[in-house]
Image (spheres, rainbow, N blue to C red):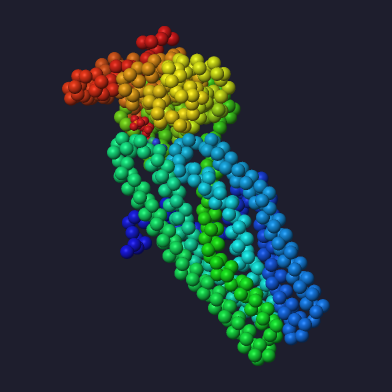
Amino acid sequence: MTTDSSPTMPASSSGPRPITPWLKTYRQLLRSSGTRAAELRAALLGLTIAAALQGLALACLLPLFSSVLPDPDWPAVWTWLAVMTALMGLATVARWRAQGFDFDGHMAAATHELRTRLGEQLRRMPLERLQDKRTGEVSSTLLGNVDENLNYLLTVVNLILGAIVTPLVAALATLFVDWRMGLILLLIFPTILPLYRWRRPIFARNMRRLAETHQRINGDILEYTQGLPVLRAARCAGERAASLQEGFEELRLVQSRAQRAGNRPKVLIASLVELGLLLVVAVGVTWAIAGTLDVAVLAALLVMVSRFAEPLANFVNYTAILELIETALERIEALLAIEPLPQRTPTAVPTEFDIAFSGVTFGYAQGDRPVIRDLDAELPARRMTALVGPSGSGKSTLTRLLMRHADPQRGTVAIGGVDVRAIPPETLNGLISVVFQDVYLFDDTVLANIRMARPDASDAEVEAAARAARCLDFIERLPQGWDTPLGDIGGRLSGGERQRISIARALLKQAPIVVLDEPTAALDTESERSVQEAIDALVRDKTVIVIAHRLSTIAGADAILVLEDGRLVEQGRHADLLAAGRRYRAMWNAQQRAKAWHLIETEPDRDTLPPTDSQTIPNSAASEPR
Ligand code: ATP
């Protein structure tokens, strides 16, 4: 038997949250509908008016029946029929106009605007904060949550108002015909509101948990499909599929828990509504027999209450959808609330491209300790500086601080003496090219994939960059050459070819600073050689930062910074660091020993040898006079 304490049951990531008051949800809705807020407000008001008019129209049954029974008073009958028809007609017009928010395209425009704002926010928000989020979760906020938020809104609100406002107005109107029956109606129908308020925290928690589980599984599915090649290679696709399966199982549990938790209150509320109905009938019939209630009024009341019963009984189901909308609104607002990194004024644009880290201490928002500690380092312009150190020592973090994915908590990062916080973001982006080990290719043509580094580049410039990056040979072999969509064949390009596209992008960008995150580490010897040639073209005359694990690739660097646990523990040139016999020397010796083991363990057949370090990233001293 599955119990709520099952170990596979996910804990709500944020635990029980306070219930959002409806007024707050209303304000969030208006905020999320941006420039269409006034139209949305008018539509919601229109729906409320329509529900109230509907209640009044139903209340007209009371005088109408009274004018029919026991003897028809035809002028009164026609008058009340006309009033009722007019009220119904007005209600229809009000509802129709309100729903024009959907039909007239305001809804589509509001969701489009919201998605655009979220997209813009992704562009503005610090990359560090974005990296904390999983792709699937971001995409489900952008697509699913936006649609959940607005698209079903009017339909749900219409149903909820029909269940609450219509009976309430009809009951109030009944007070004027027979105050005792009016009072009974007023006592019965609104009782479901406190009942609902009492159970709402449970509904809300379960609906939110459901939404969170959906979002997490969305992320899992995306990761699984994207990572399938890696998972298969690592022979853990099965394990991962099993964990995905566990996710589905979690979803099943969350769903059944939500249904179980919602079921009893739903049945309770529906039964109370039915009981209320019976009470009205019983009291009405008793009073009618006693002669204190007009039979015509009783007949009209019976028609009215039977009309209210179903929407009232379903009220809880409608509000469950409202909980989903609230969850979606919260996610959207949380994403929109992330502030971009502050821009220092006055802004400045560097003219020199040396890099200086001064007293930098930095810890990630999600981390519990600093990963860069009180670090001072100067990286000279138009020279190559290598960052080395054990995994997790902070090499990539340093380059992220340079690119301003986040700001250090203490100290400054400067380019050409200008604090990166004073450089406008677009300018800073233009100053730095990055070549990573993993190359991201977009679902667009080869030409567009290279040109995205500098959208105003001419075809000739793109071709020149591709030639310098040694891309021409394989681009010409592609089925549609430059116009081949990489979305279709990106997976068929070799690692080296993908790397060279990324280098062509960097070349086209002509940024004065180049960050190389060990681009050749995962390549075979042949690819490594061609990528190496491409890199030679890229780094010429630039300020270069290389992140390296294989020390032999950076032996020729102008400066080597050795990091350990976020601190700069040694710096100098390769020969000096070897001679110093400290941390770098120990790392070097360890790598040489490991290489020797490989050579002993493998056949001396070149093809079967592991990737060699024969190629080195060139340095200014070795390759180019600067
Ligand atoms: P590697 O050589 O393995 O790439 P590295 O030297 O480049 O490692 P960093 O990636 O800079 O190291 O990571 C430094 C520390 O910061 C590590 O302990 C890492 O777990 C942590 N870290 C990195 N990114 C984040 C993040 N987004 N949130 C929290 N901690 C992070």
In the image: residue 13, left or right of residue 86: left
Quadrant of the image occupied by residue 552 = top left
> Quick check: 484 above or below 409?
above
User: In this picture, is 201 found above or below 281?
Assistant: above
Percent position of residue 350, x then y: 53, 21
Q: Is residue 78 above or below residue 92?
A: below
At x 68%, y 78%, the residue is 300
The image position of residue 603, as x and y in percent, is 19, 22
Image coords of residue 27 (percent x, y): 61, 53
Residue drawn where x is 32% and y is 16% of the image:
615
Q: Residue furthest front?
A: 479
Quadrant position of the N terminus in the picture: bottom left
Question: What residue is rendered at 31% in x and 44% in y?
Answer: 238
- Residue 576 sits above or below residue 193 on the image: above
Pick the front one: 272 or 133? 272
Report ligand 1 position as a quadrant: top left
Residue at x 57%, y 73% (from the top left corner):
191
